[in-house]
Amino acid sequence: MKRILVTGGLGFIGSHTVVELQNEGFEVVIIDNLSNTSIGVLDKITEITGKKPTFYQIDLRKKEEVKNFFDTNKIDGIIHFAAFKAVGESMQKPLDYYENNIGSLVYLLEEMRDRKLDYFIFSSSCTVYGQADELPITEKAPVKKAESVYGNTKQIGEEIIKDACKAYNLNSIALRYFNPIGAHPSIKIGELPIGIPQNLIPYVTQTAAGIRKELSVFGDDYDTEDGTAVRDYIHVLDLAKAHIAALKRLINKTNKENFEFFNVGTGKGSSVLDVIKTFEKITGEPLNYKIVGRREGDITAAYADTTIANKELNWKTEKTLEEALEAAWKWQQQNKS
Ligand code: UFG
C-alpha cells in the first residue's frame, strides 16, 4: 500500500483529495499548519471514510521540522496543496507569498531528491494562462506574465519542479485547476472562507443565507454573451479525483515526460449571470445582486480544453454546475457563520 503525504490536507481541495485517496486504499499522512482551516476537518474526514489519517501540525517553512518528519515517516509520494491562495492579499504581502509558496516547495523537493521519492503532484492554476488568446484553453497555450504575486508563485513553482525533475530524475505532474467549487456530497467537508469571501460561490451562498446583504457582480460589459465574465467551475470532488488519476499515472509509470501538466476543468464556461440563475433555481428564491464595475485584474473568459487531461489521465468530470452549487448551498446552510 502506497503511503502518500498530503500537505494542506485539511484545506478545501486537500481534504476532498484525502477522502478519495483513502477510498482508493492509499494510506494518507497529512501535514497542515492550520493557518487557513481547523483541526475539526480531520474528524470529518474520519467520519466519511471510517479511517483516521495520520496528522502532523507542521509549518513547511521550518526546514528542520520538514527534515525530521521525513526522517521518521516512510513516504512514497507527495501531493502538495499547502500554499497561500488569495490573489488580493498576495499583492499586499508578496514576500510572505514567496517565502511560503516557494520556500516550502523547495524544501519538499529537496527531500524528494535526497530520499529518492517517486511521485509529486502540484496544485497549479489556470491563472498561468492569463487571458488566453484562444478559447477553450489547451495546454499548448502560452504561459503569460502573471497578473498577481499568487499567480507568479504558481508559474515559478512549475518552473522549479520542471528543473528539479530534469536534474534529479524526479517525476511530477502539475494540475492547472480552473475554478473549484462545491462540497462533499456528505456535506461534512467544504470550503471555509475566513472573513468576507473573495470568490464568487461563497459570496453567493452567504448572500442567500443572509450573511451578506447583496452580491456585487463585477462588470457586465465584457465581450461575452451576457456581458459578465466567464469561468469554468469544477466540482471539488471531480477535482479531487483528478489527483488520484495523476498519482496512478506516476505509480504506473505511464507518464510521457518527467514533468507534465494538465488542465483540470469541465470544459464548459459559465458566466456570472449563468451561475446566479442556476443558483436561484436551486433555492427557488431570487438572489439579491447588483451590477457594479469590473474588478481589477479580472480576465474576460477562461475555460478548459480537457481533451488531453481526459485522455492522458483517463479521467473526466462527472458532476454538473447544478450539483456543485447544490452542494455548496447545503454546506452553507449547515455552516451558518
Ligand atoms: N465575481 C463577482 N462578484 C464577487 C466575486 C466574484 O462578480 O463577489 C466574479 C469575478 O469577477 C469573476 C468570477 O466571479 O468573473 C469568478 O471570480 P472568483 O473570484 O470566484 O474566481 P477567479 O476566476 O477570479 O479566481 C480564480 C481563482 C484564483 C486564481 C484566479 C486567476 O480563485 O485562485 O482565478 O484569475 F488566481
Image (cartoon, helix red, strand yellow):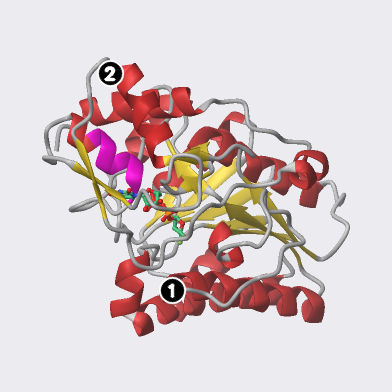
Please tell me whether residue 201 belongs to the stretch shown in magenta: yes
Seen at 22% across and 19% down, the residue is: 285
Precedes in sequence: disc 1 or disc 2: 1
Residue 331 lies, with reference to residue 311, above or below; the image says above
Please rate how many residues cluster around mark 2, counting C-alpha atoms within 10 Å: few if below 14, some from 14 to 19, many from 20. Answer: some
Dot label at residue 283 = 2
Q: Quadrant of the C terminus?
A: top left
Residue beneath disc 1: 148
Whether pointer 1 and pointer 2 mark residues with C-beta atoms closer than 8 Å, the reply is no
SS category of the residue bearing label 1: loop
* 81 within the magenta span: no
Whole-number angstrom distance, CA of label 1 to CA of label 2: 35 Å
Q: Amino acid at mark 1?
A: Ser
- The quadrant the N terminus occupies is top right
| Residue 54 pos. (x, y %) | 46, 47
Q: Secondary structure at mark 2?
A: helix
Vertical relation: 146 (above or below) 261: below
Q: Is mark 1 within 8 Å of ligand 1?
A: yes
> Is residue 185 in view?
yes
Q: Residue furthest bottom?
A: 95
Spot occupied by residue 58 in the image (x, y as percentages of width and height)? 38, 65
Residue 149 position in % (x across, y down): 43, 76
| Residue 34 image point, x, y percent | 31, 57
Which image quadrant is residue 114 in? bottom right
Q: Most prominent secondary structure in the magenta stretch?
A: helix
Look at the picture and state if 145 lies above or below 142: below
Range drawn in magenta: 199-205
